[in-house]
Structure formats: structure tokens, C-alpha cells
Image (tube, rainbow, N blue to C red):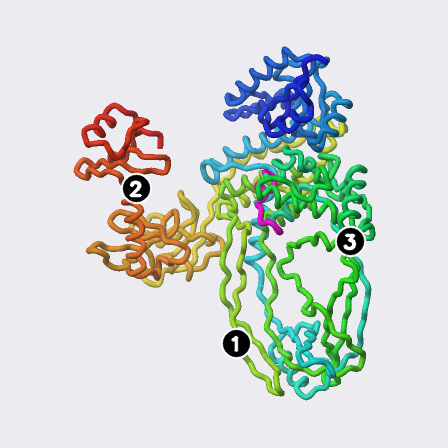
């Protein structure tokens, strides 16, 4: 056999494959894409068929040079990049950039890195699939045109340094629209009536909790029910038993893995994809970018053997799931362990946890249905026409539940109160221990988590498995959206309680509205969204974005020509860009909230140079005042009362060691100022209420940390030697200077330090 060069994308993948192929194969990595569109200019010839101009980046020139040298010596070059469109494009770029002749090139794909899969791929090579390459190129070109053409419009009409993206802008739109649904939501209260009963003839500790299904719109009506129940005799009117089945969920696709890893493991989308990539490259799981729920015949057989061995043959049920997502096109198999018989792996903790989740889901998908006996009991009395209903579920056969139970995004999902019911008969008397009517409130729409946003995008046919994680990362990095955890707030609710023949009324408190790892829009995200909707509605139209994905699929299957798809979009889009640049006024977002009770001047909120702010006085008022809005306060929903509280700052907290302490809120959050030092306040400290004792603690702590950093100090020369984050350095005024390697910073005297300053260059800040 001649010399074989195998090129893959990542060094980890290369290392794993090298173990299987032996000494006749030299496996090298391209470290991802070796070329792309220019970063500095459009890089697309819009006059000549939208031909892209690809460049090898400086960081990849050494890799390209090495691969060129190796490919000249090789008899066969095996292009073994991933099996999706991105992988196909990488293979094509390698072929073009390295100048590889067709007769020397073999394209191979495999969806798992195992010896059998790789040897099978080598037996069945093919040529680079240009339809897949052109589908990827169409996406890249369209996204570049949208981003490159829209960004200057945003710089001029909204704010400098902004950018837009085709899928990202749609994701922001979803988050903004959900926020507005929440802001316009009307909170309504109602009463639910619940009873706790003890069946006659049973131990007094036996309790059955039952609820009236009706919602009572007022306290008066709920109170009437309790009054009628005070002398009532209750008995069981009916018992309905029904056997039901629960079917296991299908094996993981990329998006369902992202959702479940978020809910069960608390992983972010990026963490899930990074960990899954590590598992794939180490040969533990199949390819992690897929929208297929299909499993291979070999996997089905192995799953059956594993389940039979671990749990018994009665737990095994072979299934093949149909893929439901629109335009499923990436890999041809779901995400599963490469060897299902391996229940555990030797890896780092995150990899172990994600692998366990994938193993459980895969195995559960090939297990028997769970059989559950659902029991509904109606408890009735002649005193009221409504019935109390108690429900319980008893597992008759656990089936797949022995291994796995799927999580849900529904935060308000009711759990059965009764984990198991005692033996009961129709007509049996039920002694009411407590009957209570509790005030409940309508639920506002939930904000998106990363997982629920992915689910929504997938349902709408927007984006593809490989796009979800980078899309959400991008909108967070751009400051359009913030991923945040926010505490709830206290609210009162009424409870009426019938107990021992008497009715009592109590006002209780509960915490509501707490948010954990939710996606909130920022003011700049709202401003950009509204501007794009007004001027470029087609770009962030849900239907258009989904249709484009379908057209990419048609390009991949050879039914459409890529640059004709681009042309159909670009010409009207370019016209919109020109019209908007010429005719549209700059976007502004400003609200007048009312007047300042002290000065009588208008109070308004608007977008400032460094973010959203509140202002007292008109733009031309020489005595106008400003204050930044707090995190979580939006220009379109902040109230006059909330803004007036902001103007209570800065405030003088008191004196400490003969110097004033001032509390305020700045661009980077709340702080106290003491002797020209700015000391951040933590979450537990409010700048409006922090007292001098607490401020003194923070000052002392800050001073101690600052002293630990200063190794030498020469105040009269404004020079000090600081132990910084990246090691010791010299500070003179506002300038920093490197200390020569091998020098003990504590041994320096002033003359030596001055010499270093005179001879040395400033450090890069």
C-alpha cells in the first residue's frame, strides 16, 4: 500500500483515528476550516453570481503549508471531515486550497469513531458532494450579506458597533415579543378549594387530598362553598380505575440533547456541545450534530442484548422512531453511545454525566412501555353540587422508567398529591379534616431558557442543529440579551380554612416571579429589534427564515441552484438598505414618565452613550441630571416611582476615618466611593440603605486586598511595584512597565526601578 494521508478537523479526532488505522496511514488535523471569507471586506462579488472570495487566515498558513507538503508525498488523500454540510465544505476547501487532483482524493464519512466504522468508510469512499458544499456556501454567503449590509445601517441609525444576523435577529425577536407579552399580562386572582379527608374505618393518619376542579372567581363564592361544607357529610361517589401506558421518548437529536442536558444537568448549550464533541472525538458517542432519531440495526441489536442482560427480556421492546423535525438532513443516526454495552466510561466528570444521560435515553428508547394504574376518586356531598376529585397513579410495570424519565419545561406542572391511595369503596364515608380555599393567580407566559428557545426555534423550522448554540451565544455577547437569575418578590394571598367546624381567614405571603437562568432582552436588543421590524421585516420574518432553511435543503439535494436563491433575496434587500440609509430617521427610544416632585421638571428615560439612563430636565437644560438604569429595568417598562428612587443616589453614607463615604450606582453597578477608591457593593448590599458600619467593613476588606497587591511603594515619585493578576509589574502614574524576567521584584530599589522605566517599553494594557 502507498502512502496514505488522512485529514480530519480536530487533533483529538486525529489521535483517536490513528489508533485504528496503523502505520500505513498518517492522520493530520486541519484545525477546523482552513479558509473563509475576508474579515475586513464583504468578500462576495455581488455583480458576478455572488462568487465568494475565500482567504486562508494568517493563523492557518502554517497548517496549510504542512498539509500541502504532506499531500505531495501521499499517494491517496482521505478527506475525513464530519458528515454534515459544514464537514463537506471543509473537505472541499481542503481539496481546493491544497490543489489536490481528483484521482488522489477520497472522501470518507462516518458517524462514529470506531474501528469498524472507519474501516467500513475506507471500503466505501466517494467524491466530495458539491450539492452539500453549495448548501453550506449559500448559508455562509446569505449570512455574510445580511450581516455586512445591515451593520452599517445600525451604526448610522441606531448606535455604533452594532451588528445583525439572519437567525440571531429572529431569536432576539422571539425574546422581545415574549417580554412584551409578560409586560402586558393582566394578573387575575381566583380561589381553588382543596380538602384533606380521612376515610372512615382507617387509621386517623391516612389522608386523601382532593380538589374541586372549578375556579372560584371571588373570595365570597369560595367562602360560600366552605360554609356549606361545615355541616356536610362526605362519601365516595365513584372510583374510576384505568390502566394507561407511557411510551419512552426517542433517542437524542442535537436539540433534544441540548434541552435535556440543560434541564437535568444544568449545562449551557455551549457546554453541552463542547462536552458532546469531546465524547465523539474520543469515540464514545456517535456524531453529535443530527436531527435524526433513527438507530442502526447494529445499535438496535446491541440495545436488546444489553437490556435483556441488565433487566430481563420482558423489559426489551425494539423500536425505530420517525424523525419529526422539518428538513432533517444532517447525520443519519441519532446521538447514542458507540458501544451501548458500556454503561460507564473513563473520562472527566462533565463527559461522564453527559454520557450517562445519552446512555439512559438510548437504552430507554428500546424498552417496554410503563404500565400505570390511574385512579380517580370523586368525593361528594348533598351540601354542594361540586365534587372533590382525588387522583393517583400506581406503577404496575415500570418498563423504561426503570432507567429514565424525561424532564419538562413546564414550571407549573401539577404533581399528584396522593402518591398512593388506600383501599377504598364506593359509599365509604370520608371525614373532612381540613377544607381550605386558597387564592391563586393566573400564570404569566414564562421567559425563555436556552433550552426552551431552542425548542421554539426547532418547532418553527428556524436554524439547524449546528446553529442553535452559536446563535444564542452571539446575541448574549452582543448585549442584545442577558442570561440572568433574578429573585422573586413577595406578595400576599388569602386563605380561608374550615377546620374543627369553624372558618378562619388568614393573609399569607409567598415569593413569586423568581427566574433562574432565563433570557431577558436588553434595551439595545429591543431598539434593534423594533428598527429591523420597521425597516427590514422580511429579514426577521419567521416564515421567511424557515423558508430559507427549506431552500438550503433543496440546494443540498440538487433541486435548486444556490446563487439563484441568493439573488432572489439580495436584490430587494439591497434596495431596502439604500432606502433606509437615505430616508429613515435615526432610531430613538425615549419615554417621558412624569415630573420630578421637587423641581417640577420632566423625568424621561432614554438610550444614552453608555446604555439606558433616566434624566431630569430637558436636553438643553444646563442643570439636567442623569442616572443609569439598574440591571433588569427597561426603558419601555420602568416606572416613575422606580426612577425617583434612582435619583436618591449618590448619597452620603457618613464619615470613616475623617473621609466621606458616598454610595452610588455607576456603569458597572452599585458602589461606594472612599478617598478616590471605588468599591463594588455585592448583591446583599443596597446603595440606598447601606450604613456606615457595613461600608467600613467593605473599605477595610478592600484596603487589605490592595495592600497585599502592593509589594513596594514610593509615594513621592508616584511609583509602586504591584503583584498583578499576571505577575508583578511597575506602575508609574497611569503607565505600567514590565519587570525583566528573573528579577525578584521585592529586591528592587528606587534607582533600579527608574532605570527599568527609562529603558523599558510600556506593557500592553
Of residues 632 and 690, the one drawn nearer to the viewer in this rendering:
690
Q: What stretch is highlighted in magenta?
A: 263-274
Q: Pick whichever of labels 1 and 3 is earlier in the sequence.
A: 3
For the residues labelled 2 and 1, say whether their Cβ atoms are less than 8 Å apart: no
The quadrant of the rendering that contains the C terminus is top left
- What residue is shown with label 2? 709
Of residues 449 and 138, the one drawn nearer to the viewer in this rendering:
449
Q: Estimate the x, y position of residue 633 in percent, counting from the top left.
A: 46, 54
The verdict on residue 353 being magenta is no
Q: Callout 3: 10 Å neighbours few (<14), some, many (20+)?
A: some
* Left or right relative to 371: residue 733: left
Provide the secondary structure element on which disc 1 rests.
strand
Q: Callout 1: 10 Å neighbours few (<14), some, many (20+)?
A: few
The verdict on residue 270 being magenta is yes
- What residue is shown with label 3? 247
Q: Which dot marks residue 507?
A: 1
Instruction: State the residue at coordinates (35%, 57%).
Output: 687
Q: Pick whichever of labels 2 and 1 is earlier in the sequence.
A: 1
Mark-to-mark CA distance, 1 and 3:
44 Å
Provide the secondary structure element on which disc 2 rests.
helix
* Left or right relative to 171: residue 131: right
Q: Estimate the x, y position of residue 462 in percent, counting from the top left.
A: 66, 41
Foreground disc of the pair 2, 1? 2
| Residue 548 seen in this snapshot | no
Quadrant of the rendered image containing residue 34: top right
Q: Pick whichever of labels 3 and 2 is earlier in the sequence.
A: 3
Magenta stretch secondary structure, dominant:
helix
- Extreme residue in the left direction: 716
Instruction: State the residue at coordinates (51%, 44%).
Output: 480
Quadrant of the rendered image containing residue 280: top right
Amino acid at each position: 500500500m502507498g502512502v496514505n494521508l488522512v485529514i480530519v478537523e480536530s487533533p483529538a479526532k486525529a489521535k483517536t483515528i490513528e489508533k485504528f488505522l496503523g502505520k500505513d496511514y498518517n492522520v493530520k488535523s486541519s484545525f477546523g476550516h482552513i479558509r473563509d471569507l475576508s474579515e475586513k471586506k464583504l468578500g462576495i462579488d455581488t455583480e458576478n453570481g455572488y462568487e465568494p472570495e475565500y482567504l486562508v487566515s494568517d493563523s492557518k498558513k502554517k497548517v496549510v503549508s504542512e498539509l500541502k507538503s504532506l499531500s505531495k508525498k501521499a499517494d491517496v488523500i482521505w478527506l475525513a471531515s464530519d458528515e454534515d454540510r459544514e464537514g463537506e465544505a471543509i473537505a472541499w476547501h481542503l481539496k481546493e486550497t491544497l490543489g489536490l487532483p481528483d484521482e488522489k482524493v477520497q472522501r470518507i464519512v462516518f458517524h462514529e469513531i470506531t474501528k469498524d466504522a472507519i474501516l467500513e468508510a475506507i471500503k466505501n469512499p466517494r467524491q466530495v458532494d458539491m450539492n452539500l458544499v453549495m448548501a453550506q456556501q449559500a448559508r455562509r454567503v446569505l449570512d455574510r450579506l445580511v450581516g455586512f449590509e445591515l451593520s452599517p445601517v445600525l451604526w448610522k441609525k441606531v448606535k455604533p458597533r452594532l451588528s445583525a444576523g439572519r437567525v440571531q435577529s429572529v431569536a432576539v425577536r422571539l425574546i422581545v415579543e415574549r417580554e412584551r407579552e409578560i409586560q402586558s399580562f393582566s394578573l387575575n386572582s381566583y380561589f381553588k378549594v382543596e380538602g384533606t379527608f380521612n376515610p372512615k374505618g382507617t387509621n386517623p393518619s391516612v389522608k386523601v387530598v382532593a380538589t374541586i376542579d372549578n375556579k372560584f372567581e371571588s373570595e365570597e363564592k369560595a367562602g360560600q362553598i366552605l360554609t356549606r361544607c361545615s355541616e356536610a357529610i362526605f362519601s365516595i361517589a365513584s372510583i374510576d380505575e384505568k390502566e394507561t401506558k407511557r411510551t419512552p421518548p426517542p433517542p437524542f437529536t442535537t436539540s433534544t440533547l441540548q434541552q435535556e442536558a440543560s434541564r437535568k444537568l444544568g449545562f449551557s448549550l455551549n457546554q453541552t456541545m463542547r462536552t458532546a464533541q469531546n465524547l465523539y472525538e474520543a469515540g464514545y458517542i456517535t456524531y453529535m450534530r443530527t436531527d435524526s432519531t433513527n438507530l442502526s440495526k447494529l445499535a438496535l441489536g446491541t440495545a436488546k442484548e444489553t437490556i435483556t442482560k441488565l433487566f430481563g427480556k420482558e423489559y426489551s421492546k425494539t423500536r425505530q422512531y420517525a424523525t419529526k423535525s422539518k428538513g432533517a438532513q444532517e447525520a443519519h443516526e441519532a446521538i447514542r453511545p458507540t458501544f451501548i454495552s458500556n454503561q460507564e466510561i473513563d473520562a472527566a466528570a462533565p463527559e461522564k454525566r453527559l454520557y450517562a444521560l445519552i446512555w439512559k435515553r438510548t437504552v430507554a428508547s428500546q424498552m417496554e412501555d410503563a404500565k400505570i394504574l390511574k385512579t380517580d376518586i370523586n368525593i361528594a356531598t348533598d351540601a354542594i353540587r361540586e365534587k372533590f376529585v382525588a387522583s393517583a397513579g400506581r406503577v404496575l410495570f415500570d418498563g423504561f422508567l426503570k432507567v429514565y424519565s424525561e424532564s419538562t419545561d413546564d414550571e407549573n406542572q401539577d404533581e399528584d398529591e396522593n402518591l398512593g391511595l388506600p383501599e377504598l369503596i364506593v359509599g365509604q364515608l370520608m371525614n373532612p379534616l381540613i377544607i381550605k380555599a386558597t387564592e391563586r393567580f393566573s400564570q404569566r407566559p414564562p421567559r425563555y431558557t436556552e433550552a426552551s428557545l431552542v425548542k421554539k426555534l426547532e418547532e418553527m423550522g428556524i436554524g439547524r442543529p449546528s446553529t442553535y448554540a452559536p446563535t444564542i451565544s452571539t446575541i448574549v455577547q452582543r448585549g442584545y440579551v442577558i442570561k440572568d437569575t433574578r429573585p422573586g418578590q413577595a406578595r400576599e394571598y388569602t386563605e380561608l380554612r374550615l377546620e374543627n367546624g369553624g372558618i378562619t381567614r388568614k393573609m399569607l405571603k409567598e415569593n413569586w416571579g423568581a427566574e433562574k437562568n432565563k433570557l431577558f432582552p436588553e434595551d439595545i436588543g429591543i431598539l434593534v429589534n423594533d428598527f429591523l421590524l420597521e425597516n427590514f421585516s422580511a429579514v426577521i420574518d419567521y416564515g421567511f427564515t424557515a423558508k430559507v432553511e427549506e431552500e438550503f435543503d433543496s440546494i443540498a439535494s440538487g433541486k435548486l441552484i444556490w446563487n439563484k436563491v441568493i439573488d432572489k433575496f439580495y436584490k430587494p434587500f439591497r434596495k431596502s438598505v439604500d432606502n433606509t440609509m437615505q430616508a429613515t430617521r435615526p432610531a430613538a427610544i425615549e419615554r417621558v414618565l412624569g415630573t420630578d416632585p421637587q423641581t417640577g421638571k420632566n423625568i424621561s428615560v432614554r438610550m444614552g452613550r453608555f446604555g439606558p439612563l433616566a434624566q431630569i430636565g430637558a436636553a438643553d437644560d444646563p442643570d439636567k441630571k442623569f442616572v443609569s438604569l439598574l440591571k433588569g429595568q427597561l426603558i419601555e417598562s420602568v416606572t416613575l416611582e422606580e426612577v425617583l428612587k434612582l435619583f436618591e443616589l449618590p448619597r452620603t453614607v457618613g464619615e470613616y476615618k475623617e473621609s466621606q463615604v458616598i454610595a452610588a450606582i455607576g456603569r458597572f453597578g452599585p458602589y461606594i466611593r472612599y478617598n478616590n477608591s471605588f468599591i463594588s457593593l455585592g448583591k446583599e448590599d443596597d446603595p440606598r440603605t447601606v450604613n456606615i458600619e457595613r461600608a467600613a467593613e467593605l473599605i477595610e476588606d478592600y484596603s487589605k486586598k490592595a495592600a497585599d497587591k502592593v509589594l513596594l511603594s514610593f509615594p513621592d515619585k508616584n511609583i509602586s511595584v504591584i503583584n498583578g493578576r499576571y505577575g508583578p509589574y511597575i506602575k508609574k502614574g497611569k503607565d505600567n512597565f514590565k519587570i525583566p524576567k528573573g528579577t525578584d521584584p521585592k529586591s528592587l530599589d528606587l534607582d533600579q526601578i527608574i532605570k527599568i522605566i527609562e529603558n523599558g517599553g510600556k506593557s500592553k494594557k
